[in-house]
Structure formats: structure tokens, C-alpha cells
């Protein structure tokens, strides 16, 4: 079997008044990730992991943050376009293992919705995605709730035997 592993990381500042969209799901919280696009760090880390495993570069190569075309771009657009590129390169997703680092809000009740949303956008089963959440134990910018980060590891297999 021809397997390819990829990793992705992203971090965004949390800004008061921004919608908190994580993995495509709107969370009820007074601050949210700030970025040129929608600032969704989980979707961005996932897209970077997919591109890395496929040997297609990084998210900045495909969706430059100085290009007005991608301003406020929704994660769904980025992820579905990345999946089209991954499939065109001959790969399918085996599984994705994702960790979100944030102090608050708690993700426990929203994890399933995030897994279902991301798997729907990717055209895979939600069982192929695992989502974990960690706090930063109150330390540094993550612990103060000034930012949110996400880390993703993904495994792809080639359709060619
Ligand atoms: Mg980002």
C-alpha cells in the first residue's frame, strides 16, 4: 500500500466580537479567531496536512493571504478545493487525527458536530476523523485565551496499486 503522512499546524489570535468558527461550527463565545480568511485554525491545519501529505506545498501557496480573493474565505471553500487537489493527485484519506489547543470554551459538546462538518466537506466518514482538545493549563498566550491553535496529522493512501 502506498501511504503518505502529512502534518499541519495553525494558530490564530482571538479577537472580541469575531464569530468563533472552529472546524466549520459556530461556537457561542464572545471572542473568535481573527485572520485574513475566516480564521478557522482547525480547517487551515487540516488543509495544510492534506497538502503536505500530497506533496502540494502549503495553504499559503494556494490561498495567499495578500490576495483579496481569499479575504473572509470560508473554511468550506478552502477544504473542498484542497480535497479536489488531493484527489486529482491520486490520493484518498485514510484518517485524520486532530488536536485543538484552547483555554475556552470547552469543546466537549461540539466535537461531534465538528467531526461531522469536516468529514462532510471532505467527502469521508466522520469515523475517519478524531478530534481532541487540550487547554494550555493557563500558561502564555494560549492559556490567557489570547489565541487558539490546532495540530493535525493525516494519513493518505494512493489509489494506484
Ligand atoms: Mg490560518
Image (cartoon, helix red, strand yellow):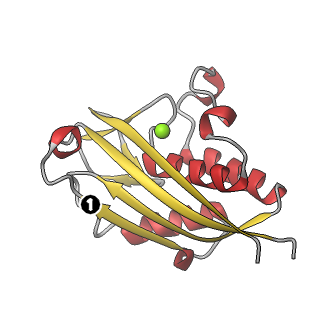
The structure residue drawn at horizontal position 51% and vertical position 69%, both measured from the top left corner, is 116
The verdict on label 1 being within 8 Å of ligand 1 is: no
Depicted 63 relative to depicted 124: above or below: above
Of residues 70 and 5, which is closer to you in this image?
5
* Left or right: 36 in relation to 89: left
- In terms of secondary structure, where does tag 1 sit? strand
* Tally of numbered tags: 1
The structure residue drawn at horizontal position 41% and vertical position 72%, both measured from the top left corner, is 112
* Left or right: 64 in relation to 143: right
Position in image of residue 93 (x %, y %): 67, 68
Depicted 117 relative to depicted 27: above or below: below
The structure residue drawn at horizontal position 22% and vertical position 56%, both measured from the top left corner, is 135
Position in image of residue 133 (x %, y %): 31, 63
**Quadrant that contains the C terminus:** bottom right
Position in image of residue 87 (x %, y %): 78, 60
Q: Residue furthest right?
A: 160
The structure residue drawn at horizontal position 44% and vertical position 31%, both measured from the top left corner, is 35
* Left or right: 149 in relation to 48: left
Displayed quadrant of residue 18? top left
Position in image of residue 125 (x %, y %): 60, 76
Depicted 134 relative to depicted 61: above or below: below
**Quadrant that contains the N terminus:** bottom right
- Mark 1 Cα within 10 Å, few/some/many (few <14, many 20+)? some
Q: Which residue is mark 1?
A: 134
* Left or right: 59 in relation to 148: right
Amino acid at each position: 500500500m502506498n501511504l503518505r503522512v502529512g502534518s499541519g499546524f495553525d494558530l490564530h489570535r482571538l479577537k472580541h466580537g469575531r464569530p468563533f468558527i472552529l472546524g466549520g461550527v459556530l461556537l457561542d463565545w464572545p471572542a473568535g479567531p481573527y485572520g485574513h480568511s475566516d480564521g478557522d485554525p482547525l480547517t487551515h491545519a487540516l488543509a495544510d496536512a492534506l497538502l503536505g501529505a500530497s506533496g502540494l506545498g502549503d495553504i499559503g501557496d494556494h490561498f495567499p493571504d495578500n490576495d483579496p480573493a481569499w479575504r473572509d474565505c470560508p473554511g468550506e471553500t478552502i477544504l473542498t478545493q484542497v480535497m479536489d487537489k488531493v484527489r486529482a493527485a491520486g490520493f484518498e484519506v485514510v484518517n485524520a487525527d486532530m488536536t485543538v489547543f484552547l483555554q475556552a470554551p470547552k469543546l466537549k459538546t461540539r466535537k461531534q458536530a465538528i467531526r461531522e462538518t469536516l468529514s462532510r466537506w471532505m467527502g469521508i466518514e466522520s469515523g475517519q476523523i478524531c478530534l481532541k482538545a487540550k487547554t494550555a493549563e493557563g500558561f502564555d498566550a494560549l492559556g490567557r485565551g489570547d489565541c487558539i491553535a490546532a495540530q493535525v496529522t493525516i494519513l493518505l493512501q494512493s489509489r494506484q496499486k
